[in-house]
Image (spheres, rainbow, N blue to C red):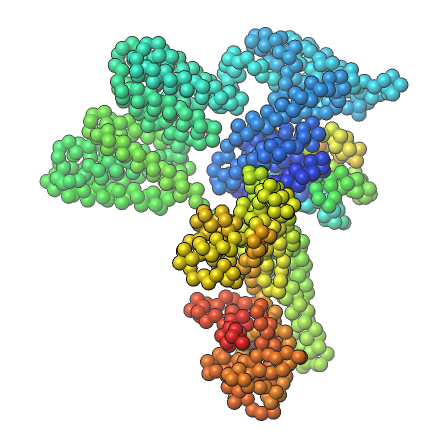
Amino acid sequence: MAKTLLIVDDAVSMRGLVAMTLRNSGYEVIEASDGKEALNRLQGKKVSMVITDLNMPNMNGIEFVKALKSLPAFKFVPIVMLTTESEDGKKQEGKDAGVKAWMVKPFKPDALLGVVRKIIG
Amino acid sequence: MTTDVELYKRQFYDEARDILEKANDDLLRVEADPGNEEILNSIFRGVHTIKGSAGTFDLGEISEFTHGLEGLLDALRNGRLLLKPDIVDVILEGFDHISLMIETLADGGEACVDRTLMRRFKDICERNQAVKKSSESAVHKGETKRPEPSPAVPRRLKEQFRAHSSKGLNIYRIKVNYTSDVFRNGFDPLVLLRNLRESSKFYYVEPYEHTVPVLSKFKALDLCLKPTIYVATDAGLEELKNLSFDPSLIEIRKLRISDEKTDGEKTCSGKEGIDKDLLKEFLIGSSDMLESMERAIMHYEKTDSQDALNEVFRAVHTIKGDAGCTGLKGLKEVAHSLETLLERLRKGEIKRSPEIVDTLLAGTDAFKEMISGIENNMHVSHHSIQDRICRHLGEKDEAVAGRVSLLPDGSEKVFLMQARQYIDILRDNIKPLPLDSCRAKIVRRALEGLDKAASFMKIGELNILIQKALGTIGGTDDTLVLKAVEDISIFIEGVGKGRLRLGEILVRDGKVSEKDVRDALSRQEKIGRILTDENNVGEKDMGEAVRKHEIMDRAGRARSSATPETRTMRVEESKIERLSDMTGELLVSKNTFEHLISQIASKGKVTPSMIKSLKDNMYLLARVTNDMHHGVMSLRMVPVKSIFQKFSRVVRDISRKQNKMIDFITEGDDTEVDKQVADKLSDPLIHLVRNACDHGIEGPDERRAAGKPERGNVILYASQEGSNLVIRVTDDGRGVNREKLFEKAKSMGFDADSPDDDNLLDYIFMPGISTKKEVTDVSGRGVGMDVVKTAVLSLGGDVGVVSEEGNGSEITLSIPTTMGINDALLVEADGKLYALPLDYVVETVKITTNKLRKHRNNILFHCRNEVLHAVRLGDMLSGTGNGRDKLKNDVEIPVVILKTGTAKFALVVDRLHKKMELAVKPVPDSLSMIDIIGGVSILGDGSVVLILNPERLFRSAGGGNQ
């Protein structure tokens, strides 16, 4: 069965591009526009990996990661931050919250696929 | 896949527009509150997001430009820079430029980076940094990150770097950002530093002791080593990156040492295409060069001085070298030809003549044009100047060769252009008949050229036509030639119009390769040239043909870019979600019906309980359809905020320009309005706001003198009032000068009674008045007022103006909201059904006829302490006047009491039906002169019902003169 990924980004263009890239490579994708929606969408589902933006309305990336990591079902799901933020402090904050990798936009779709493959195969 | 990317790109444009709009707004807010870091941060993040997304979508221009802007914003949010009005100006300009780039890109154009603006960003950053640096000498925060567009090199290092870079070494600045975490995991930054040192010829570490805490606070496992290192090495960027186990932990930046030539030459030799930095330098340097070149040419013209000529030559030569190095092919070619020309002038092979000087000057003009073209990312053709130079040289082939390579890709287009060119030549020469021998020769050559092109494109049909035409030349009847040529041109036009991309098809089918086609075309071009060379075609004719060819080329491009665009609209997600929920309910209701029907079918009869469930379900369905209707309608609605937002910028610009202090206040931002209405209102509102600021609000001195606060107010207010959207633009400025307006109106021949006439102010909406400067200056109102009125009227709305001299003006726009659905009361008159919009209905009462009193021609009656004017609907519609006589005595009759904007009156009807929701359609054109009809709708039984317009109804009932 195809692996499922969750993409969280409030910019539809970014989310769409990421989702399309992944779908074209045979992954299943769930999309959400912010942390809150992502948590709702995830209910009862199983995902292999989460890619999330940092700056989002309602619930930002870090809060979302913290919330996700507190759920037993998602405790060990690898999370990648895909964001324009490159400040060290934020990165550290992300790492502390349990972010596995930090990708800074702009990204090349192939590079993203590379990271995904490396993490979940 | 590419179309998908295109789709997301469009989405990105939309998002970027939103971000910019918000950023604009934020910027203006923060200007009033300069210390507000939160807003500055949000602006920065917005621009940062655009940059990131643009990079992902390969929109290099946008990311480059936003990067520059970001540097400035970063300095602002870090407090390194204070937000001053002039900086706000620059940033706003930056936003505008980003918008411009986005719009250009969205329209399929090519965006260009505004270099001067970028330089200004940089200047502001550096200017302030310099100030800062000198003031804070000892205390220096090691952690602050500085995304300077190009890092400044410490002065003491510059000399050494210059020496090294002249030896061909690359200079890098490396920041090592290893964290304590990485360190604890066993990665030692010293390894990196050692490797770095070994691979560099020159190695310098910027002092960084300040990152080490005092001993009492020192923790052994914390990493304090975060040096910035300058190296000169022959290794490349990638090689340096690989020295670290994780390249993201080090930040490497290549430095360019501002002493140039050698360094520049080297970089470009290794690089393909156009090097951006070099280009920038070239663009800056070239303008001086061109100026001195122009001067020298002029001097040469006057004096024939060899020195001046030499100077021109040197300038051209430098341009050629720089252009070649920068990768600007067109420029280089022109420079090369010019150089050849100058060379011959120098040797005396060509004599100085006014024409030659003209050409030389034209050459500098062409350079300027091409350079500005490069700056604006436009392709400027250099063919004409090239041809002109070559004419002096008598060396045509060389130029031609250069030209072919510049023909646009896509052989089919080239073929069409080529073919049309031949056709033009043919048409120009075929008449008058009969052909003389010279023109016969031209025609034959053109046909032969076309024949070759056709055979390369493998268009057999065309070949046959051409052979036929060739056969007729020199025959007895030249009209045959004419006819054959016409056939050919029709065939070619057909190919062009039918958008048969022949070349594409052929190439795709593998029948010809692109190279073949291009080879073919290069040969044709030469044939075309030979025509000129052998004087078969005059220069003028050829020039004309070439010009036509260029026009067609452009026309073709315009046509191809005009692919149908899908218009999209952005909708709040919650609205869509509600709709999809409703769809779910719809499904439930459908299933219930299915279930009930199957129950009825199995039982063979209908029980009362079944009827009840059917009814219940009906109600559910009614509710859902109702909700859905409203839901779908609400998709079209946008908050007026989207238009109001733009205006704060307008106000600011004017107040800055005119040194006024204006506070812009918006109220009722969340009022929703149909998207189409919003689009149409945007322009008139700009006029109004601009007028209010420009003519309404006075300068601070004048205001003070008038006893008003220095700061003026412009208020934009929106609200939903009944079924109307009301927008008010209010200012507390000087108001309209009635006296002057009156004079003006009279002089324009308008029928105005006195300066105190109530209707006088309406004249400001008259086009003749509004365009006159005198009036706009004194009246404070004017420019574009008729535009406002026209726009509002086209939306079915109305404009009103109130103004008090010295105290300001208020303009009110009221626009009926087109929800498309209306609550209406159905009434019957003379056996027919009519609908009255419920918004106007105050109440319905039943009164006995003997309560009606007749006074002259009017029927009046007393209701709730009010005397109301009554009209019988049936009479009014049939035009038979008031027939109280038709009403029987002592019968209860139903009356609908209506309230319009101006009055309250009663409508006597024959019967009251029910209240209903109607989907209102506009009145068909054929009925549009009957103004008492506001719309039409269709009832459940399929019959048409007219919706009456109470405002007009009352007027036609003669209520106005009561």
Q: Is residue B802 left or right of residue B605?
A: left
Q: What is the x, y in percent for residue B548?
A: 30, 37
In the rendered image, the vertical position of residue B572 relative to residue B6, given as above or below: below
Name of the residue lying farthest toward the left: B476
Name of the residue lying farthest toward the bottom: B889
Q: Quadrant of the N terminus of chain B?
A: top right
Give the residue at x 74% y 28%.
Answer: A88
Residue situated in front as seen by the camera: B32 or B80: B32
In the rendered image, the vertical position of residue B291 relative to residue B55, given as above or below: above
Q: Quadrant of the C terminus of chain B?
A: bottom right
Give the residue at x 80% y 25%.
Answer: B181
Give the residue at x 27% y 45%.
Answer: B490
In the rendered image, the vertical position of residue B842 relative to residue B276, given as above or below: below
Residue situated in front as seen by the camera: B631 or A1: B631
In the rendered image, the vertical position of residue B191 relative to residue B367, given as above or below: above
Residue B506 in view: no
Residue B205 in view: yes
Q: What is the x, y in percent for residue B402?
A: 36, 23
Residue situated in front as seen by the camera: B161 or A23: B161
Q: What is the x, y in percent for residue A50?
A: 72, 40
Query: Count of labels shown?
Result: 0
Q: Is residue B222 left or right of residue B101?
A: right
Residue situated in front as seen by the camera: B506 or B343: B343
Q: What is the x, y in percent for residue B323?
A: 44, 20
Give the residue at x 75% y 20%.
Answer: B140
Q: Which quadrant holds residue B601?
A: bottom right
Q: Which quadrant holds residue B182?
A: top right
